[in-house]
Image (cartoon, rainbow, N blue to C red):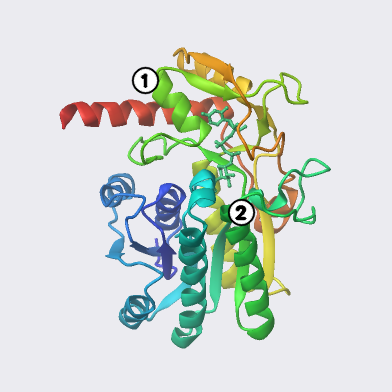
Amino acid sequence: MANKGKILVTGGTGYIGSHTVVELFNAGYEPVVIDNLSNSNIGVIDGIKAITGSLPVFENIDCKDYNSLERFFEKHSDIKAVIHFAASKAVGESVEQPLVYYRNNIVSLINLLQLMPKFGINNIVFSSSCTVYGQPEILPVTEQSPIQPATSPYGSTKQMSETILRDATVADKNLSVVLLRYFNPIGAHPSAEIGELPNGVPNNLLPYVTQTAAGIRKMLRVFGDDYNTPDGSCIRDYINVVDLAKAHVCAINRVLEKKSKKNIEVFNLGTGNGVSVLEIINTFEKATGVKVPYEIAPRRAGDIEQVWADASLANKELGWKAEETLENTLKSAWKWQEKLMAKNKEE
Ligand code: WQD
């Protein structure tokens, strides 16, 4: 397919970044990946090649390092747009190490925004999060739902980053920004060549479910079943990671076509369906035939009770909609977990 141009993907060896690199190749773009490999590994590049047959240019660069980022842009001057994933994203860790989170997530973004215009790059798609909404009063959440005070330094960095990007578009009319607010990304590429690689004990639900199903974890703890929800467990909007990756291609198309009259747009990326923790467990067991031993544990500090998206704006403006079923998504997570176990056995 004709090369539609170079797209810089920061954090491109990460979970969502790597799936987005695959979809950029599929859409005829030429993704260039930079990552400091602080929370991912270089083997992901081989997984991308196994799926697409194409090897993305990769450079081990830390976006906090202005000079190395500047040298990178000098080498790759024909970049049309940036998708900025590179950031720390563990909510709990951010509470313990707030300054690390502010430095990593905010300095990286400011470096990028200061360097981009120097190299004629005016388009950026930013990886944001539904966490900016906190516990919404009204559900489903639209892009106009109020931004609530952040409940973690991680959430603060996402809110601050959105503010920085908004202010940058006021100062620089050439800058085009799309903010993508993810709900809960889950699953893996159906090929099981790439997927989620949590470091250590998973914070997030799905990797903990698959590791418990695999016997790596003894028991899944369900953090509370006394919430004001139908089955008492928390509700989230779980979105398939490949669907999420495809939304980034739609966002890149959007900024490059310069169709929008506004130079900053925000989109919720969710399925529009709320699913509880217990429903995830039941659906996983039904879809895979594998039991997930669990116990009800006390609520986890900082958890909101329920949130799911109204994703109609992304459908209307980006022509994007989450398509994969929850069952197939959970199956892909399990297939990936089995692949990881087979790899570990070989090593
Ligand atoms: C989901 C539900 C837990 C683990 C966070 C960030 C968000 C994004 C995704 C980065 C909750 C319950 C979990 C477990 C459980 N991160 N749970 N047992 O907290 O909705 O969102 O991760 O971009 O920004 O805020 O995701 O997967 O941690 O939890 O019962 O072992 O599963 O209580 O209700 P969360 P999660």
Instruction: Name the secondary structure under disc 2.
Output: helix
Q: Quadrant of the N terminus?
A: bottom left
Real-space CA distance between mark 2 and mark 1, rounded to the nearest whole angstrom? 31 Å
Q: Which residue is mark 2?
A: 155
Which of the two labelled residues, at mark 2 and mark 1, occupies the earlier sequence position? 2
Q: Position of residue 113 (x, y in %)?
A: 52, 77
Q: Residue at x 44, y 57 (%)?
A: 24
- Density class for disc 2 (Cα within 10 Å; few <14, some 14-19, many ≥20) is many
**Disc 2, disc 1: CB below 8 Å?**
no
From what the image shows, is residue 111 above or below residue 295?
below
Q: Amino acid at mark 2?
A: Gly
Q: Position of residue 75 (x, y in %)?
A: 30, 80
Q: Residue at x 61, y 57 (%)?
A: 180
Q: Nearer the viewer, residue 222 or 235?
A: 222
Residue located farthest toward the front when viewing the structure as drawn? 96
Q: Which residue is mark 1?
A: 214
Q: In which quadrant of the rendered view does residue 70 lie?
A: bottom left
Q: How many marks?
A: 2
Q: Quadrant of ligand 1?
A: top right
Q: Residue at x 68, y 31 (%)?
A: 235
Q: Mark 2: is the Cβ under 8 angstroms from ligand 1?
A: yes
From what the image shows, is residue 62 above or below residue 195?
below
From what the image shows, is residue 267 above or below residue 260?
above
Whether residue 259 appears in this view of the structure is no
Q: Nearer the viewer, residue 222 or 191?
A: 222
Q: Amino acid at mark 1?
A: Ala
